[in-house]
Amino acid sequence: MQNLTLHAFLILSVSVLLSAVLTYAVRAYATRRGFVAAPKSDRWHDRPTAMLGGVAIYATTVIGYFLFVPYSRETLILLAGGTILFFVGLVDDIFNIRPYQKLLGQLFGAAVLIGSGLTMPITGNEIIDIWITGLWIIGITNAVNLLDNMDGLAAGIAAIGGIGLAAGFLTSGQGNELLLAAVFVGGLIGFLIFNFNPASIFMGDCGSMFVGFILSGAVLINQSGGGGRSRGILPILAVPALILIVPIFDTTLVTLVRKIWGRKVSQGGRDHTSHRLVALGLTERSAVLMLYAFAAVAGSISIAVAHLALSESLALIAVFSILLVIIGVFLSKVKVYESTGSDTSAPEKAVFGFIINFSHKRRIFEIFLDAALITLSLYTAFLLVLGSLENSEAWDLFVKCLPLVIPIKLAAFLVAGVYRGLWKYTSIRDFVTYAKGVALGSGLSVIAILLLYRFQYYSRTVFVVDALLLLFAVIGSRMMFRLIRSAIPLPKTAESRRILIYGAGDGGEMVLRELRNNPEWNLTPIGFVDDDPHKAGRVIHGLTVFTGNGSLGSVCQEKDIQEIVISARNFDGEKLRKVREICVENNIAIRRALLKIETLE
């Protein structure tokens, strides 16, 4: 295995060099012959950029395959189908064919794989499995095409997915497929040298369709395990989805949100996951790198799922799925559509406009989420205390009590007031409410099981662990929006001004929260200033407190401050005069934040 790994790494390195050379040549040819993508209002790039980068990826994969990879039936069939998709995409790049014509080409490519016997053995019914496999191939092919919306995104995510597949080929002993994956990943990395921000060439449809098809088809080969060995229904479903989670997640998010807003799913737009991350304040590079990290984590989970016991894999997948749902809900709330009076895609005109009428009733989402958390916590408690649940009496006990526990705990949450708060403003006081709800729900659940089943064969420790896990899960889910928001820098515009907040007390903290919650102020807090020497060097919500005793001018120069906002209520005239003098000397504006409570007559 060590020699095979080294061989694959050497092939990958050669493929990177070959791809880089070919990409450089294709870029020069495309620029000279006018195959250039011009900027459009619904596209992200802002300058003319060469196309046809997929030619380099395809050529590298084909050349590398015939030079380094021993022939096998599966790999030849995969490459043949990929070739069909490459030429369909190339025709689209040159002549701009219609979507249904591209779909027809994708069906031909899928038919090559399915006709060779490569299907997902999910249901046991050949006809149904063929349809599922066809939808998988076409879905992933188009998902990668949709993902190609920001410099370096599709190529990088595909490379990470390819590495995940290579790991699967290695562990299952599929040597030929591993070497093909190495060639393919090398072709992507070599192209990525020129495609990462700022990109000088795009892969085009010839690249995205070829890449998406190879990934979806390679998953089918990987699932066969070589020689047709089946590895269970969970790996068949979960492993490919985890390896390609970013394009799947992005396509699902875009499709649902566009349907809700009455927009065409097939049209381009700046509403993808990457665009939403940029709208939240990340740079393009940071957004792409964050999605790379997300794909890497999902790929690692896919490797774990392929080797863990079923009960452990289910718990891991459930946790990851819940996180995905919460992240998806958070990103769906990011404003990316311009609202105008003549906008024909207004929510009330949407095909699924009724969803909007319920969107404000987030309690429905919370209840479903809590039901999932209750299930996961109880399942994990059984797993931790009693061990694996596969083919054991513990599984029967779990299934027996779950339908009883879920409604009891949800009712307890309702009585305790868990559903009264807003996640955005979750505080320590809310934690007490959550603890009351969990304690009440756990106590009532134990009593119900005692009355119905006499608590026979049940472990008391399970329900103690379950209560602790559920409390952490409820608190974590409610804090998730704030955690995501705090992990992403505030959006900055060209008009945004760098400010210091004078006063590191309650008033200053209130001003900071107001500025962070309302970017419309166009003020970016850089730090605090306070006359109290004991506060110097301390940190409030990630911002440093600087001393105001004689060093305000130097701090403003060092931090390139454009404005000072005074938050302290007790700010005497002499101190204000000195601060004004410093502001005048450094050409800095000065304002005062006031909280007024006035009597209306």
Image (cartoon, rainbow, N blue to C red):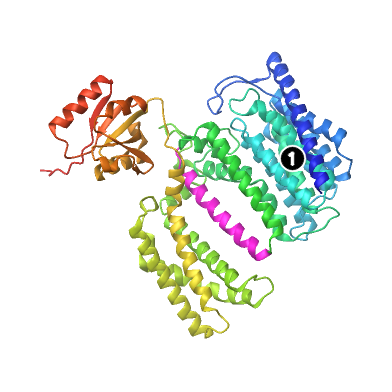
Q: Residue at x 55, y 80 (%)?
A: 458
Name the side, left or right, on which 239 lies relative to 114: left
Name the side, left or right, on which 502 lies relative to 158: left
Secondary structure at numbered mark 1: helix
Q: Residue at x 63, y 71 (%)?
A: 387
What is the x, y in percent for residue 384? 58, 69
Q: Amino acid at mark 1?
A: Phe
Q: Main secondary structure of the magenta part?
A: helix
Q: Residues within 10 Å of mark 1 (few under 14, many from 20)?
A: many
Check if residue 502 falls in the magenta segment. Answer: no
Residue 195 vertical placement versus 296 (above, below) = above
Residue 426 visible to the viewer: yes
Check if residue 315 falls in the magenta segment. Answer: yes
Quarter holding the C terminus is top left
What is the x, y in percent for residue 391? 69, 73
Check disc 1 and report the residue beneath it: 213
Residue 401 location, quadrant: bottom right
Give the magenta range. 310-335
Please name whichever residue, 511 or 53, is drawn nearer the observer in this view of the structure.
511
What is the x, y in percent for residue 408? 45, 72
User: Which residue lies most toward the top here?
Assistant: 32
Name the side, left or right, on which 122 lies relative to 318: right
Residue 537 location, quadrant: top left
Residue 138 visible to the viewer: no
Residue 392 vertical placement versus 69 (above, below) = below
Residue 147 location, quadrant: top right
Please name whichever residue, 114 or 216, is drawn nearer the observer in this view of the structure.
216
What is the x, y in percent for residue 39? 57, 22
Please name whichever residue, 147 or 435, is drawn nearer the observer in this view of the structure.
435
